[in-house]
Amino acid sequence: AQSVTQLGSHVSVSEGALVLLRCNYSSSVPPYLFWYVQYPNQGLQLLLKYTSAATLVKGINGFEAEFKKSETSFHLTKPSAHMSDAAEYFCAVSVFNDYKLSFGAGTTVTVRA
Amino acid sequence: DAGVTQSPTHLIKTRGQHVTLRCSPISGHKSVSWYQQVLGQGPQFIFQYYEKEERGRGNFPDRFSARQFPNYSSELNVNALLLGDSALYLCASSPPPGLKAKNIQYFGAGTRLSVL
């Protein structure tokens, strides 16, 4: 079975500062990895995905993530935080031919002016 | 194109009652998955349907059931509601299987269920 662990349930950053959200995965076969964002009272929006192509993945809203097999990690970064980035972020894992997504517990991001 | 649509958006029920939640997938998508998101936690997988057949089931009791219709829309049913069933229920649809599908799931806005 696959699983992900998100380190840090809350992250607070200043506007314009680096955003770094950590995700480590566990999978016995090559994984597919995803980051989703959830704004208050809304569903999940796909930010980016790793599906065994380039290890550095660029997503929407200036976010990117790097797949590191040796570290079983898929950390999410954004060079400069914006107030609109305040939301909850979820890392998720799946494997080929299995549409089930296994989510982490989430990281809440707050952005200080 | 319309995204995944879910109805109703909010629902209040009392313990012991039954509830039906509805989901319409993105046009062309034949797979629908259901997730439960309890406040403060990540979504938990409940069911996945593809071409009207159940493909997977998470660790949920038999009070939870689902079905998929010929137009690929889906219903999630929960019987004998408990207080612990209060959650956001999310539906997701996936493009047809293939090299490009890559298990990508697109989520609706969810149905907020409160059990009193």
Image: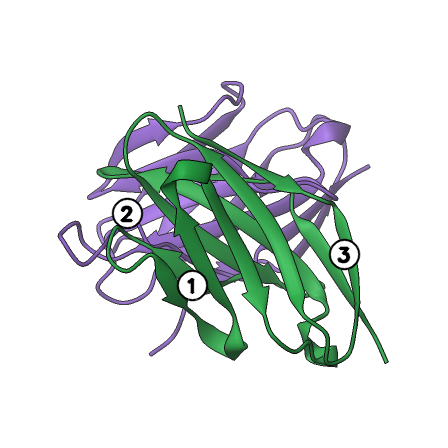
Tell me the quadrant of the picture where the N terminus of chain B can be found.
bottom left
Q: Say the numbered circle drawn on residue A11.
A: 3
Chain of the residue displaying label 1: A
x%, y% of residue A66? 43, 56
Q: Say the numbered circle drawn on residue A48.
A: 1
Foreground pick, B97 / B26: B97
Q: Please say if the residues under marks 1 and 2 sit with CB atoms less than 8 Å apart.
A: no
- Cα separation between marks 2 and 3: 42 Å
x%, y% of residue A47? 48, 65
Q: Who's purple, chain-wise? A: B
What's under tag 3, amino acid-wise?
Val
x%, y% of residue B93? 35, 54
Dot 1 crowding, Cα within 10 Å, few <14, some 14–19, many 20+ = many
The residue pinned by badge 2 equals B69
Are the numbered discs 2 and 3 placed on the same chain, yes or no? no
The quadrant in which residue B10 appears is: bottom right
**Left or right placement of residue A23 versus residue B66 in this view:** right
Does residue B67 appear in this view? no
Q: Say the numbered circle drawn on residue B105.
A: none
Q: Who's green, chain-wise? A: A
Chain of the residue displaying label 3: A
**Residue sitting at x 25%, y 50%:** A52
Foreground pick, B9 / A56: A56
